[in-house]
Image (tube, rainbow, N blue to C red):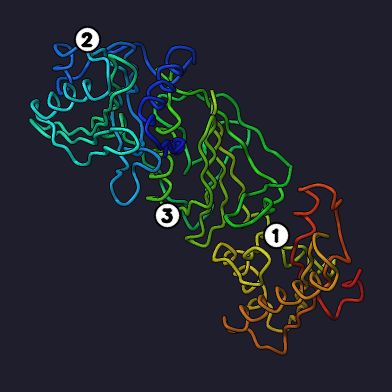
Amino acid sequence: MRQPAVSLSGAGASRLRFAVITALLAFTALPLLAQEQPLPAELSFLNKLGKPYRITYEPWTEMQMPDGDRGGNGIGKVLRGKHWQFPVIVPGAIKQDAIWAIIKPAFLANGWTAVHEWSAGGIELFLHYQKDGVEAWATTGPGDPERAGVDMIEVAPMPFKFTLTAPSTKPEPVNPIAGDFPWLGPLPGSRFRSSAPDPAPFYVAIKGANEPELVASGSIIKAYYAPRDGLSNPLFRVAYHDALTAAGWTIVDERMGADVIISAHFTKNGRNLWASLHKNDTFDIRVADAGAVNKDMGSNLKTNCHVAVYGVLFDFNKSTLQPASDPVLQQILDLLKKNPTQKIEVQGHTDNVGGDAYNQTLSEARAKAIVTWLTQHGIAGDRLTAKGFGKTRPIADNATDAGRAKNRRVEIADPNCAAHSR
């Protein structure tokens, strides 16, 4: 959704709002807006009323109308479709009341219905139009002398159909240096740019957490050029959000400003896939198969006596396991079920943020939470122990976000192995 506008109030609110919009249109390059477009039929009456100018048009967007505080209290609607925005000259109408006496009746006389009107703190009208298969929503209000502002969405579906296939139980082959991901491809009209493996740790921004969390030790990144006719940020966000959700992915985080960032997690069919999508002028898709990364957990435990397990996620500063942790915990569960004599010590570790006592308590509580999850899923309690180490055993530099993410970890260790305590 478009970023909320600044809330304006007071006697000159509408005039100030209009002035800001006009200034932006005059002096700011808007790369996502096409060249000036003629008015649609439902607004054509404005050509007789006055002089629309600087008509900017987006072929498709998603936005709340009215924006900001105006759309509160159930009045605003999240709309998708074609977007027009422009000022219109109302000759001879110098004061706001005079402009309003012309612009409001003109809308109502041409098929528009008033949904809500604000008369205090600046005049503004929220309108609805539905006729001959066309549905539109608009706001209008007086601005500077002889000026009114118009903002309209004509409801329309996305300009293309886009769907994704859910990852299957059997991992599909992925070429790290060419081609698309089999279940997370580019939008229609996009062009392949590059593909490469990335051995760097994969971090995900988790809602409620202060810092990104480490969920996998590597990923594959595939980059694309946007369609030649352009790709707006709202269209990119909505297309991938809807397609990912329909294919069974969970949207973990989503942000839109100058760039778009979407983080998603797939945990069905025994899979554990993390994806990060990023758009600016071009866009890239990064995927980490955390399930494949942890597939050697058993052999690593046998060889090294202990193994760090990433992707076990907790609520911020708590020992409450997040549902996104289930695929990793399931792998620990599968290891114990395949080796019925195997015992493990679950070890909790933190970064250095906070006091010694606090981190010690937190790490112990998190280790116990994992033991509880395993016993609830059928593992005998005498095969499991929990131990917290707080911040006493860092494996990376706590001076960086990446280092702290590595130190906030869970390890499983073989208590019968002499080297498990390192």
Q: Is residue 179 among the parts visible in the rendering?
A: no
- The residue at which mark 3 appears reads as 248
Q: Are marks 2 and 3 in contact (CB under 8 Å)?
A: no
Which residue sits at x=76%, y=65%? Answer: 299
- The residue at which mark 2 appears reads as 91
Left or right, 366 with reference to 169:
right
Q: Are marks 1 and 3 in contact (CB under 8 Å)?
A: no
Alpha carbon separation for disc pair 1 and 2: 66 Å
Q: Secondary structure at mark 2?
A: loop
Q: Tell me the quadrant of the picture where the C terminus can be found.
A: bottom right
Which residue sits at x=27%, y=31%? Answer: 139
Q: Secondary structure at mark 3?
A: loop
Left or right, 385 with reference to 248:
right
Where is residue 122? Give x, y as percent.
33, 33
Alpha carbon separation for disc pair 2 and 3: 55 Å
Task: Give whichever of discs 2 and 3 has the lower sequence position.
Answer: 2
- The residue at which mark 1 appears reads as 310
Q: Are marks 1 and 2 in contact (CB under 8 Å)?
A: no
